[in-house]
Structures are given as structure tokens and as C-alpha cells.
């Protein structure tokens, strides 16, 4: 039986039950949950960075957005509040669309 030891999406147990496979899950404490969310964010970032085609990249970005939604709530914010902060930062400091790359700044 493969061992995963990782945070899973809420509907995975139902999908596993429908296949008739046996599995073991647990419900994490709040502290464990937050820690595992951060690990999952790293995992999904790696999967995005290693995506071999555009469709896979978009799927991984969707996973990242799902995690950002959940993490925002963990910090006491809504995704709308995160989006507001993103827009404010973009208006104040810009975005990344201009492809600018800074080499150095003279003191």
C-alpha cells in the first residue's frame, strides 16, 4: 500500500471509497493543518515549475489558487481582501508584466 503522508482535497476520501480501496486518514489539529498547508503550497509550486505543457501549468496554478484561498482564510482574510491588497500593491509598485530585470543599484 503506497504511503502519502500529505494533505489532500476534501473529496478524495469519497473518491477512494467509490473505488473500493482501503485507506487511512486523520483530521489534523489547527497547528498541523497550517503547517501542512504550507507544505502543500511548496509541493504545488514545484509541480507548477516542473509542468511540461501549458495545460498542466494551468492545472497547477489552479491548485495554487485554491491554496491561496484557504491560506487567506487561515490568516483571517478573504480572497477578496487578498485581491484588494494585490491591486493596491500593483498600483503603488507596479506588476511584473514589463519583464524588468534588475542587475544592481549603485549606492
Image (cartoon, rainbow, N blue to C red):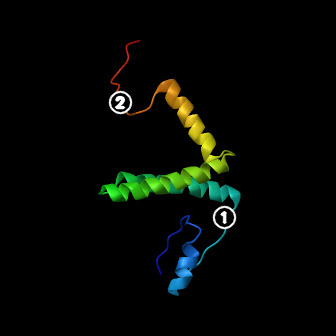
* Mark identifier at residue 70: none
Identify the residue at image location x=63%, y=54%: 34
* Mark identifier at residue 98: 2
Tell me if I can see residue 51 in this picture.
Answer: no
Secondary structure of the residue carrying tag 1 is: loop
- Above or below residue 68? Residue 26 is below
Secondary structure of the residue carrying tag 2 is: loop
Identify the residue at image location x=49%, y=25%: 93
Mark 1 or 2 closer to N-term?
1
Tell me residue 26's x, y (percent): 64, 71
Q: Using the numbered discs, state the Cα–Cα distance from disc 1 to disc 2 in whole angstroms.
A: 42 Å
Q: Quadrant of residue 83?
A: top right
Residue extending farthest top: 107
Residue extending farthest bottom: 20
Q: Quadrant of residue 55?
A: bottom left
- Is 64 situated left or right of 10 in this image? left
Identify the residue at image location x=61%, y=74%: 25
Tell me residue 45's x, y (percent): 44, 52
- Above or below residue 53? Residue 101 is above
The residue wearing badge 1 is 28
Q: Pick the residue in front: 77 or 22.
A: 77
Amino acid at each position: 500500500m503506497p504511503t502519502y503522508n500529505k494533505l489532500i482535497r476534501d473529496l478524495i476520501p469519497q473518491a477512494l471509497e467509490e473505488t473500493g480501496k482501503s485507506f487511512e486518514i486523520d483530521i489534523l489539529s489547527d497547528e498541523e493543518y497550517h503547517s501542512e498547508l504550507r507544505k502543500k503550497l511548496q509541493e504545488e509550486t514545484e509541480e507548477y515549475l516542473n509542468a511540461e505543457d501549458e495545460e498542466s501549468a494551468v492545472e497547477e496554478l489552479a491548485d495554487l489558487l485554491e491554496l491561496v484561498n484557504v491560506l487567506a482564510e487561515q490568516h483571517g482574510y478573504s480572497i477578496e481582501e487578498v485581491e484588494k491588497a494585490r491591486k493596491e500593491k500593483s498600483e503603488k509598485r507596479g506588476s511584473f508584466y514589463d519583464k524588468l530585470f534588475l542587475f544592481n543599484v549603485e549606492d
